[in-house]
Each structure stands twice: as structure tokens, then as C-alpha cells.
Image: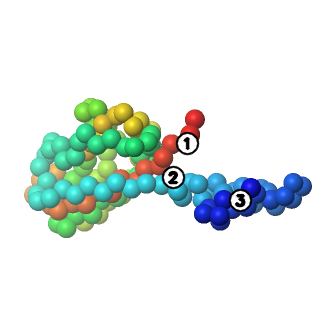
């Protein structure tokens, strides 16, 4: 059995290299499962604004990380977002600290099926300057086939 697009060939029966090949296949499949969704907040951020909503993934996914980059970072307080699932806040937040232009956060325990709406809501903005022109990259993994 071969899977040339994955650069993987099943070793012959009795081949002791199977474990190394199996690990390589798992790594390649995990790489394929990684997906990204980019959202752009145009203009100046507004507190409690829903900036993205009612998006449905094609398959079930786990949200694993958020990376954010601001053209103009927040000052006085952090810029913070939360995720929405079918319109409800999930209390899974990510922030750009005051005085910074980027922020990253690992996200645990947040999954969406293909039937659930995904969204992003601003939960906090900078008190002196809210932050502006912010790109948000959502890192997610396709869930394994049951």
C-alpha cells in the first residue's frame, strides 16, 4: 500500500521500520488537519462589537490557537476577543496587551461541528486607544474521523 501524496509507503510484512514510518504518517496527517481562518477587523475596534458571525466550517474542528496582529495596537488596556458558538459567548479569550501590536493565545476545549455557527466578539478595547486594523488568524484542526 502506498500514499505517494503523503510521501508514505507501508513497509513489507516483518519490516521493523514500521514504527518510524507510522510516526511519519501521523505527523503528515496532523499537518494536513491544520486549518486557518483569517478575519480582519477594519477600522477602530469597538467594545462588545460582533465582528464575525454565522460562519460554518465544512467539517468538525477544534480551535487550538489565535494569532492577532494590529496595525495600531491598543493602549491603556488590552484588546480582547471571545468566540461565539451559535451566538453564545464561550469565555475562550485571546488578547493583544496594551502597548503591543500582536498577541497569541492557545485555546483548549473549543470545538465546532459543521452545523454550529462560529463567530468572534470584541470583549475589551484599549481605554486610551482601542486598537485598529486588526488581523485575527484562527488556528484549528480538523477532527479525526470517528
Picture residue at 55% right of the left edge, 42% below the top: 144
The residue pinned by badge 2 equals 33
Answer whether residue 98 is visible to the viewer in this image: no
Q: Write the residue at 25% across / 39% down.
A: 54
Q: CA distance from mark 3 to mark 2?
A: 20 Å
Q: Which mark is residue 144?
A: 1
Give the percent coordinates (x, y) of residue 96: 27, 57
Residue at (33%, 41%) from the top-left corner?
56
Q: Secondary structure at mark 3?
A: strand
Secondary element at image label 2: helix
Q: Residue at x 17, y 62 (%)?
A: 133
Q: Position of residue 69 (x, y in %)?
A: 27, 63
Q: Nearer the viewer, mark 3 or mark 2?
A: 3
Instruction: Say left or right for 116 vs 70.
Output: right
Label located before the other in sequence (3 or 2): 3
* Left or right, 135 with reference to 130: right
Which percent across, then down, holds residue 14?
89, 55
Element carrying mark 1: loop
Instruction: For marks 1 and 3, give the CA distance.
Output: 21 Å
Mark 2 or mark 1, earlier in chain: 2
Circles 2 and 1: CB distance less than 8 Å?
Answer: yes
Residue at the disc numbered 3: 2
Quarter containing the C terminus: top right
Farthest residue to the bottom: give it: 71
Residue positioned most to the right:
14
Amino acid at each position: 500500500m502506498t500514499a505517494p501524496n503523503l510521501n508514505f509507503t507501508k513497509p513489507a510484512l516483518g519490516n521493523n521500520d514500521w514504527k518510524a514510518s507510522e510516526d511519519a504518517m501521523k505527523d503528515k496527517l496532523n499537518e494536513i488537519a491544520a486549518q486557518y481562518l483569517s478575519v480582519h477587523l477594519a477600522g477602530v475596534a469597538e467594545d462588545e462589537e460582533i465582528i464575525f458571525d454565522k460562519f460554518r466550517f465544512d467539517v468538525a474542528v477544534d480551535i487550538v490557537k489565535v494569532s492577532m496582529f494590529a496595525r495600531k495596537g491598543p493602549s491603556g488596556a488590552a484588546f480582547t476577543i471571545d468566540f461565539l458558538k451559535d451566538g453564545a459567548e464561550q469565555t475562550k479569550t485571546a488578547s493583544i496587551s496594551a502597548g503591543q501590536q500582536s498577541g497569541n493565545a492557545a485555546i483548549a476545549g473549543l470545538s465546532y461541528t459543521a452545523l454550529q455557527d462560529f463567530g468572534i466578539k470584541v470583549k475589551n478595547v484599549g481605554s486610551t486607544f482601542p486598537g485598529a486594523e486588526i488581523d485575527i488568524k484562527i488556528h484549528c484542526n480538523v477532527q479525526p474521523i470517528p
